[in-house]
Image (cartoon, rainbow, N blue to C red):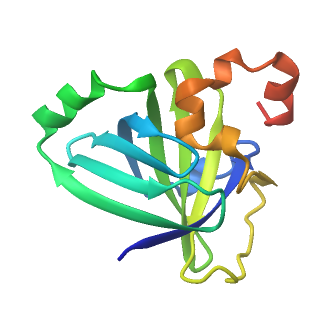
Amino acid sequence: MSFEIERKFLVQGDGWRQSTTRQIRIRQAYLAYDGKTSIRVRIKQEKGATLTIKSREPKLRRLELEYPVPTLEAEALLLLRKGAVIEKDRHEVPAGDRTWEVDVFTGENSGLVIAEIELQHEHDRVELPAWIGREVTGQRRYYNSALAQDPFSAWPKREHAQSGH
């Protein structure tokens, strides 16, 4: 059984960009979600597609089961989504002995930039690069499934400023 342990942070500034080693375009949508689970289809540019089932409690450690699916079938599943398609450019950014994933959202979530770091254990210590802002781990509104329902573009302008953008 597979688990995901990650922390999420808002990003401040562009200081991370010069360290990017890889970038990939992602489109994803949610087929089902409730307070307990979510089912997501994701298409990565030139990398194929996956169907993912995740437990939804906003904790560091969550169940995550991921299965490859043909891209053509994933495209068809996108049409069955609930809410908006999440579009983002994911940047891999090494910092210290870890690699961060910095998601620059486009489309309805344009202006939002979130950094995630995967951990081996819930209590792993993480050295935060200078470009890391406020931690949003556990704040539902910053999770992709919530952004599909309540996109960043619909948030009040004062909340955009609090998000660093």
Residue 28 lies, with reference to residue 23, above or below; the image says above
Nearer the observer, 106 or 69 = 69
Residue 144 lies, with reference to residue 147, above or below; the image says below
Residue 5 place in picture, x, y as percent: 56, 70
Residue at image location 56% in from the left, 25% down from the top? 149
The image quadrant of residue 142 is: top right
Residue 81 place in picture, x, y as percent: 36, 26
Residue at image location 50% in from the left, 20% down from the top? 107
Residue 98 place in picture, x, y as percent: 56, 74
Q: Is residue 135 toward the left or the right of residue 146 in the image?
A: right
Q: In this figure, what is the number of numbered marks?
A: 0
Q: Is residue 31 toward the left or the right of residue 100 in the image?
A: left
Nearer the observer, 45 or 42 = 42
Q: Is residue 123 toward the left or the right of residue 87 in the image?
A: right
Q: Quadrant of the C terminus?
A: top right
Q: Is residue 13 toward the left or the right of residue 78 in the image?
A: right
